[in-house]
Image (cartoon, grey):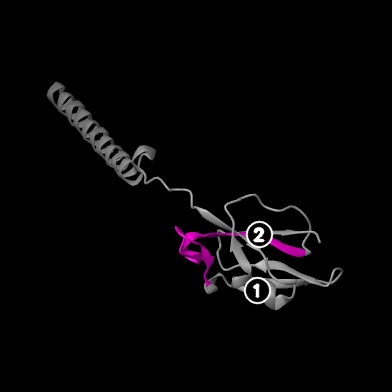
Amino acid sequence: MLMRSLKNNWLSAGITLLFLLGAFFVVRAMEKKEIKETIPKSKQPVQKAEVLYTFEYKGPDFSKANVENEANWVYTPNTELCEGSEEIPCRIQVSQSYVDNPTTSPTLKSMTNITADLNPISNTHFVDGIADASGVISNRAL
């Protein structure tokens, strides 16, 4: 009887030990998977801030056709934006992919696709949209 009781205790202890050991390896495997899936910030690629080119409106008037004409927009090194209401166009900023000759004499590409909207009070057009999702539109008061 003593031998039987001892055998049962060892068997019970062995099963418990195997169960705990199995649980340990399962948890350990899950931790390794999480570590592999998360890339430390020090190893993540650094994203550069995109350079924006500023163009100022120099068209003859504020008609829809002239505001939407890329040839009426002249590059300016001044990156300040205009403040005011949406009455007339002032400046737009676009990324390099929308600029021809970015290092020598920047000009807007036709794919900039400037769209103008009418201000009914002043009867002038202002910039309402550009194709560049990272671009900036700056209109001003008349």
The image quadrant of residue 30 is top left
Q: Residues within 10 Å of mark 2 (few under 14, many from 20)?
A: many
42 or 86, which is in the foreground?
86
Q: Secondary structure at mark 1?
A: helix
Q: Quadrant of the C terminus?
A: bottom right
Which portion, as a residue range, is magenta? 88-109
Rendered location of residue 24, percent (x, y): 27, 35
The residue at which mark 1 appears reads as 68
* 119 lies above or below 91: below
* 2 lies above or below 100: above
Residue at point 56%, 62% (across, down) = 133
31 or 22, which is in the foreground?
31
* 58 lies above or below 27: below
What residue type is disc 2 on? Arg
Rendered location of residue 101, percent (x, y): 45, 64
Q: Residues within 10 Å of mark 1 (few under 14, many from 20)?
A: many
Rendered location of residue 106, percent (x, y): 51, 62
What residue type is disc 1 on? Glu
Q: Is residue 43 left or right of residue 22?
A: right
Q: Earlier in the sequence, mark 1 or mark 2?
A: 1
Q: Secondary structure at mark 2?
A: strand
Residue 82 is labelled as none
